[in-house]
Amino acid sequence: MNQWYGEVVQKNVTISLPEDILRWARKKAIDEDTSLSSLVSGMLGEERSRSAEYWKAFEDWKEMGPIPGLDASKRLTREEAHARHR
């Protein structure tokens, strides 16, 4: 969708779906009281949001740096961990 002078301009696209997915999508649209077009648009919008949220969280995580008091080099070795259970 594009915004043009305050209006939302939608573009038409044609997609090909396997018959079983098309049946599922039509039923889901009916269950949600919406059109197939709105259902697909909503799903794609949600996927875009999840993708953007993931990458933002990843960038935030990279900027965090080390966590004070947490040092992976001080973990037990495999042998030490297994020796505790003997």
Image (cartoon, rainbow, N blue to C red):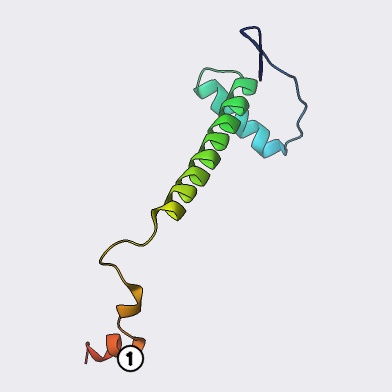
Front in this rendered view, residue 73 or 23: 73
What percent of the width, then of the height, locates residue 76? 30, 83
Front in this rendered view, residue 54 or 36: 54
- The local crowd at label 1, few if under 14, some if 14 to 19, many if 20 or more residues have their Cα within 10 Å, is few
In this rendering, is residue 66 above or below 52? below
In the picture, the quarter occupied by the C terminus is: bottom left
Residue at 52% across / 46% down in the picture? 55
What percent of the width, then of the height, locates residue 49? 52, 35
Residue at 56% across / 26% down in the picture? 42
Q: Which amino acid does label 1 sit on?
A: Glu
Left or right: where 68 falls relative to 35: left
Residue at 66% across / 20% down in the picture? 1
What percent of the width, then of the height, locates residue 3? 65, 14
Judging by the rendered image, the residue that carries numbered circle 1 is: 79
What percent of the width, then of the height, locates residue 43? 57, 31
Element type at mark 1: helix
Residue at 28% across / 85% down in the picture? 81
